[in-house]
Image (cartoon, grey):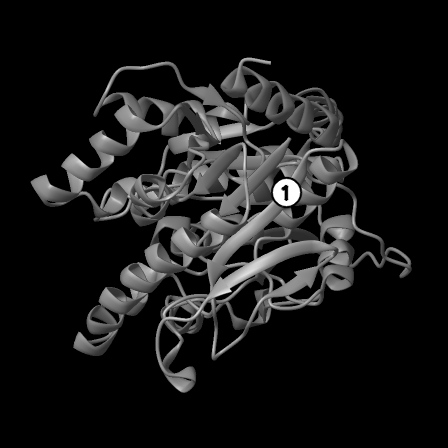
């Protein structure tokens, strides 16, 4: 069985941090004799290569120094930065389709599996008309696609993708329900961006007198970190805590200013991006993990919440907002605690409850660990993908 995966961006070297879950997925599929290759865009003239023995075919779409539409930033965010990136998108689409046609005329694939299908599904769909063998088409949605659906034209494209794909997958029930708003059909829920493992870290645990609250993620509005900072102000009235914020993004400056305004600089550390080893250290040493996600002004929210699974692997109690795909992970007072979005007072109350009740914290951590093992193990996700491919080919 031979599968071509189409994706916006892919690791440029074995040290690159882009989509590590996709690399791990393809490596594990290859171990099961499902041969996987990747078709993706170039970056600053980067050509075809092998990453972890996975063949990666990159299409060039403009002069070398201008090939920056992908990899360093989401394409929709790039497009907001000026007319040039919109101009570049035209070349991206044209050369993406052209190069895929050339590849498909040289190589035979049983399935083309498209990640983030808009616009990449159309690379595969159009290319089929110019090739001898017509591979089956699978489209995987992650939820982020639906925040850009402002025009009838774009909504029409999404509906077309859903209708014409041989199989559709979603990473959560939330994303599946979003898909069904456009066209009712069977959707396989495979959260293969979510399989996690304990990261190696040789450092010993280092406990402070203060309780440690941890947040990990991009610092953008939909993460709701400002509500966590407001909640921290209330928590500090009763117990000594420190908030560790790992990640970076467009909201970092605003969040730092908020911390300064609330006189919380001594209680919050902004770490930015950290290595895997450092991340493992912070997961290992925190007392509580919080994801205060919100539905932002564009209607965007968490498609799943992979960081919650990472915290659960370390047997840490978690608190998260009851929005989006988070509801697929957190079961209230079973393996974590759910709170309403945008309510720092209730968030503070629940943080205090967990940090003051060690038995509750331990129970949530243990149950969270079991939940991940049963529902988000690599073994389960790879098996689900194998079955999906067999069903698609009717083997």
Q: Name the residue nearer the viewer: 368 or 59.
A: 59
Q: Where is residue 395 in the image (x, y as percent from the top left)?
A: 60, 14
Which residue corresponds to the image point at 69% horizontal and 35% vertical from the top-left? 312
Residue extending furthest front? Answer: 132
User: Relative to 342, does residue 177 appear above or below in the rendering?
Assistant: above
Residue at disc 1, secondary structure: strand
Q: Name the residue nearer the viewer: 81 or 89.
A: 89
Q: With 325 as the anchor, is 95 left or right in this view?
A: left
Q: With 49 as the anchor, is 184 left or right in this view?
A: left
In the picture of the structure, the residue carrying the numbered disc 1 is: 36
Which residue corresponds to the image point at 51% horizontal and 33% vertical from the top-left? 111
Residue extending furthest left? Answer: 152
Q: Where is residue 276 in the image (x, y as percent from the top left)?
A: 73, 60
User: Relative to 53, does residue 155 appear above or below in the rendering?
Assistant: above
- Residue 241 appears in the figure: no
When asked about the image quadrant of residue 371, the answer is top right
Q: Where is residue 178 in the image (x, y as percent from the top left)?
A: 29, 27
> Quick one: label 1, few (<14), some, or many (20+) residues within 10 Å?
many
When asked about the image quadrant of residue 260, the answer is bottom left
User: Relative to 11, does residue 101 appear above or below in the rendering?
Assistant: above
- Residue 211 appears in the figure: yes
**How many numbered marks does the figure carry?**
1
Which residue corresponds to the image point at 28% horizontal and 33% vertical from the top-left? 161
Location of the N terminus (image quadrant): top right
Q: With 300 as the anchor, is 57 left or right in this view?
A: right
Q: Where is residue 289 in the image (x, y as percent from the top left)?
A: 61, 44
Residue extending furthest bottom? Answer: 65
Q: Name the residue nearer the viewer: 313 or 158.
A: 158
């Amino acid at each position: 069985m031979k599968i071509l995966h189409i994706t916006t961006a892919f690791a440029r070297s074995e040290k690159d941090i882009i989509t590590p879950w996709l690399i791990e997925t393809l490596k594990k599929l290859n171990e099961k004799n499902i041969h996987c290759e990747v078709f993706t865009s170039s970056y600053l003239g980067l050509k075809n290569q092998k990453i972890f023995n996975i063949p990666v075919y990159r299409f060039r779409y403009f002069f070398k120094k201008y090939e920056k539409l992908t990899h360093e930033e989401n394409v929709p965010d790039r497009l907001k930065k000026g007319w040039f990136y919109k101009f570049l998108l035209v070349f991206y689409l044209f050369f993406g389709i052209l190069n895929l046609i050339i590849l498909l005329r040289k190589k035979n694939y049983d399935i083309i599996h498209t990640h983030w299908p808009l616009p990449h599904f159309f690379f595969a769909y159009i290319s089929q008309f110019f090739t001898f063998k017509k591979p089956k088409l699978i489209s995987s949605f992650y939820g982020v696609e639906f925040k850009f659906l402002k025009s009838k034209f774009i909504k029409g494209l999404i509906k077309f993708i859903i209708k014409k794909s041989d199989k559709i997958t979603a990473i959560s029930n939330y994303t599946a329900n979003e898909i069904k708003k456009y066209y009712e059909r069977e959707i396989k829920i495979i959260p293969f961006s979510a399989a996690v493992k304990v990261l190696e870290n040789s450092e010993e645990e280092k406990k402070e007198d203060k309780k440690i609250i941890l947040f990990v993620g991009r610092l953008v509005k939909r993460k709701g970190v400002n509500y966590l900072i407001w909640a921290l102000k209330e928590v500090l009235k009763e117990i000594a805590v420190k908030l560790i914020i790992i990640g970076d993004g467009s909201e970092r400056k605003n969040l730092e200013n908020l911390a300064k305004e609330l006189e919380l600089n001594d209680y919050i550390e902004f770490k930015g991006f950290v290595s895997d080893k450092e991340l493992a250290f912070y997961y290992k040493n925190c007392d509580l993990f919080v994801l205060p996600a919100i539905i932002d002004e564009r209607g965007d929210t968490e498609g799943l919440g992979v960081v919650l699974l990472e915290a659960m692997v370390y047997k840490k109690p978690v608190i998260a907002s009851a929005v989006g795909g988070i509801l697929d992970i957190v079961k209230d007072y079973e393996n974590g605690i759910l709170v309403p979005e945008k309510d720092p007072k209730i968030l503070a109350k629940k943080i205090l409850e967990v940090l003051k009740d060690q038995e509750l914290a331990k129970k949530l951590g243990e149950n969270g660990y079991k939940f991940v093992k049963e529902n988000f193990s690599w073994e389960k996700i790879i098996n689900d993908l194998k079955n999906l491919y067999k069903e698609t080919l009717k083997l």
